[in-house]
Amino acid sequence: MIPLDAYPWLKALHVACALLFVGGVVANSLLLAAGRAAGARTAPVLRQWDRTVTVPAMLGVWAFGIGLAVSGGWFTHGWLQTKLVPVVLLSAIHGLQSGQIRRLVEGMDFKPVWAAGLIVPSVIAIAVLAVIKP
């Protein structure tokens, strides 16, 4: 258990990290959708952003989220177990995107990650489950 006065801070940090992480995943999707011509100039900058902001934000989402779940005793609750599915999906999409951006930066062949259509529904599902806790 964490002290009650620490809970709002833990939650705020979790939400801030989630916003940065989702923003990075969306930016990666846009870069990869733009293709080689537009992406070649932008990819090194976005790769650096990904390494310095998006990846630490993803780690923060997981760390603060686990801390919140432990403090609330929520691991046995169905809403959290359901919420973890799109969270894992977003993390996997990010991993695929990072690999493709690395390939783009290195001038190798890359295949765009056509998972952009999963990002918005996943974020909506996560938000609904986290707020409503059905």
Image (cartoon, rainbow, N blue to C red):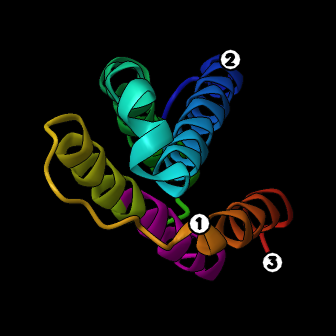
- Does 9 appear above or below 27? above
- Does 24 appear above or below 94? above
In the picture as drawn, the residue positioned furthest to the front comes out as 37
Q: Earlier in the sequence, mark 1 or mark 2?
A: 2
Q: Secondary structure at mark 1?
A: helix
**Of circles 2 and 3, which is in front?**
3
Q: Secondary structure at mark 2?
A: helix
Q: Identify residue for label 1.
A: 116
Residue 77 position, x and y percent, is 59, 76
Work out how far the residue at label 1 is from the one at label 2, CA to CA, in angstroms.
38 Å
- Residue 5 disc label: 2
Q: Residue at x 44, y 42 (%)?
A: 37
Q: Residues within 10 Å of mark 1 (few under 14, many from 20)?
A: some
Q: Is residue 90 left or right of residue 12?
A: left
Q: Residues within 10 Å of mark 3 (few under 14, many from 20)?
A: few
Any magenta on residue 129?
Answer: no
Q: Residue at x 62, y 64 (%)?
A: 119
Residue 93 position, x and y percent, is 40, 63
Q: Earlier in the sequence, mark 1 or mark 3?
A: 1
